[in-house]
Amino acid sequence: MDRQQVLHQFMQLYALQPERLSKQVRIEQALRQAITQQWPSGLRLPSHRMLAEAVNVARQTLALAIGTLLEEQLLKTAHGQGTWTSRPVTPSSPLPGNAELSSRAQRVLGGPGASKIQSGAFVPGIPDIAQFPMRKWRQLYASVTVPQNALLLSYSTGGYGPLKRAIRDFLARWRNLDCDIEQIIITDGTHNGIELCAMALADVGDTVAMESPCYWGARNVFTAAGLNIEAVPWLPEQGTTFRLLLSR
């Protein structure tokens, strides 16, 4: 496949991408489709300048898109050798059968979970990821991942110190809460925070009162921690009826 054919196919696939997407995302999707469906592995791509000119975008925009596909290992590059395609290796032998799950894991899997569809319109909890400011995010990431901030790549107690201090100052100024940074723990999300509380504040067999209906993620975390869940109904006129639990 010669260079002109590669450019022509790239231009066609780029034109098929929805115009509501950013140019960078359109490039990423066009290249991803070409690499996985049309181009052979090891195909050397035209220069970044030629690819950018083919679809009338800035070379920086193209470079950011190329960077994404390098991270996905759909492209490879080397100094003086250009950029070439690299399809993921498909295992030649079938994987062994599933390992037997623990009873705890089976209880979690038996409960409610996230939808298997995690993209597209009207998926609960999922924003329009096509509108994510990827270019700005990369710029911010590059600005902080410098040798002077090497501590970001290491482990620390309860989270990154400067971030904890910023949170402490915010709470003092806007929430009128006086706390030390040792009282602040940075987690990687809601699930991690709930799990930490479940492990630190309850023992296996303890009972947790949860509003019904409730957040299914928290319910699964408590189930995995071996806690019993007591559903507390929510009534439109009365709200959460915790008094029912206290009367038992």
Image (spheres, rainbow, N blue to C red):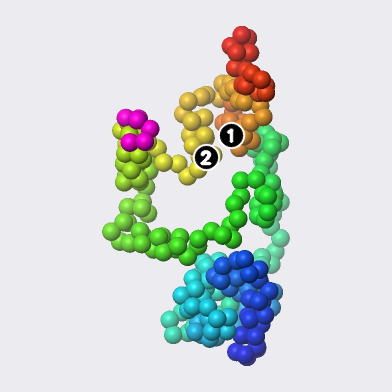
Residue 190 is tagged as 2
Q: Nearer the viewer, residue 49 or 197?
A: 49
Tell me: residue 227, above or below residue 55: above
Q: Circle 1 — which element?
A: helix
Q: Are marks 2 and 1 in contact (CB under 8 Å)?
A: yes
Image x and y of residue 201, in percent: 48, 25
CA gap, disc 2 and disc 1: 9 Å
Badge 2 density bin: few <14, some 14–19, many ≥20, Cα 10 Å:
few
For mark 1, what is the residue?
218
Dot 2 amino acid type? Thr
Residue sticking out furthest to the front: 237
Image quarter of the N terminus: bottom right
Badge 1 density bin: few <14, some 14–19, many ≥20, Cα 10 Å:
some
Q: Is residue 30 visible?
A: yes
Q: Nearer the viewer, residue 166 or 248?
A: 166
Q: Is residue 44 visible?
A: no
Image quarter of the C terminus: top right
Predominant SS along the magenta part: loop
Q: Residue at x 69, y 78 (%)?
A: 38
Image x and y of residue 109, in percent: 68, 39
Image x and y of residue 31, in percent: 61, 74
Residue stretch rendered in magenta on the structure: 173-178
Image x and y of residue 160, in percent: 35, 46
